[in-house]
Amino acid sequence: MTLKEQVDYYSEFKHWYRKIIKDFKFDVKKDYKARDLLSEILSKKGMNWNLETTLNSFKNAIQSKSSILIYGCGPSLESTVKNLMREKGIKLFNNYVNLAADGASVLLKEIGIPIDAIFTDLDGITKSEFNYSDFVVIHAHGDNMDKIREFEEDILNFEKIIGTAQVKSLNNIITAGGFTDGDRILYFLRSLLLPEQNIFLIGMDFGENIGKYSKPEMTDNQKANPIKLKKLQYAVELILMFIKKIKNEIYFVNSKVISEKFKYISIEEFKKLILE
């Protein structure tokens, strides 16, 4: 089995996709068009890019450190990251695999934290963040075809790129599962994790407010609109499902409790864990 086949879970995820499509009234045809557009652009990379080689390189990066930090765009992101940077410095972040969900990469780049991979549908980042990360995992869906075209040159020039979709996969497109940028990271990691690796979620709040790093035009945290709230609720359901599929420990760091089924720790508890 190829590595692509190992990380592709479309057959398992498709019932969730159908539920999401029905609930949000998304256009399935547009999702397929977006997938095909990204696939066509990746095909233009020619012999200079190979998905299986890129996936193997990504797997090595994921397994290179003892634990993984995943950054979402929730309201707690900035205070948590700046607290850790102030007290522990860049050395702390260098000891972990750092994976950013879309706009969370803006803060990490501002502070100078290395990003191993950005998972993005391109609506929360600029070309500056795109080219700052070691890997970029681009998600294609019906509403971001204009963004995919806008970033076409960057996609063609960037070496370690991976394309994902939420419809049936192609030879150069993966459907690993998940819905929002944050929970898609978890689903993509499913077959790549080492049993002993812990996962720490920072800024993955899933509450009533969304963080200012969610969109480039936002300057402050804001109340989530009803559609965004529904998306976050799906993300919570999907993460609960994901936890059942792995043996790794997952901790929410400095987030408000939204489910008793998740493990929450304070910043101080996180600091103690990393010193053990």
Image (tube, rainbow, N blue to C red):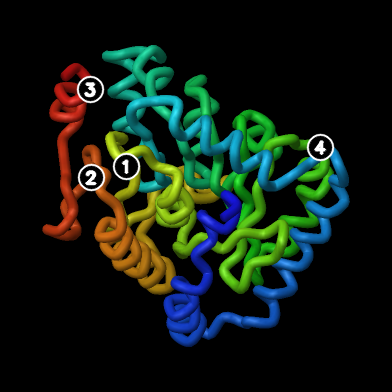
Mark 3 vs 2, N-terminal side: 2
Question: Is label 4 in a helix, a strand or a loop?
Answer: helix
Return the residue at label 1.
201
Please indicate whether residue 167 sits to the left or right of residue 6 in the image. right
Mark 1 and mark 3: Cα distance apart in space: 14 Å
Q: Are marks 2 and 1 in contact (CB under 8 Å)?
A: yes
Mark 4 vs 2, N-terminal side: 4
The amino acid type found where label 3 is placed reads Ile
Query: Residue at 16% across / 47% down in the picture?
Result: 263
Q: x and y percent of residue 259 in the render?
A: 17, 60
Return the residue at label 3.
274
Return the residue at label 4.
157
Mark 2 vs 1, N-terminal side: 1
Q: Quadrant of residue 254?
A: top left
Crowding around mark 3 (Cα neighbors within 10 Å: few <14, some 14 to 19, many 20+) is few
Q: Image height check: is 181 above or below 274?
A: below
Return the residue at label 2.
255
Mark 4 and mark 2: Cα distance apart in space: 37 Å
Mark 3 and mark 2: Cα distance apart in space: 18 Å
Checking the image for residue 232, the label placed there is: none
Please indicate whether residue 187 sits to the left or right of residue 272 in the image. right
Q: Image height check: is 187 above or below 51?
A: below
Q: Are marks 4 and 3 in contact (CB under 8 Å)?
A: no
Mark 2 and mark 1: Cα distance apart in space: 9 Å
The amino acid type found where label 4 is placed reads Asn
Q: Image height check: is 59 above or below 119?
A: above
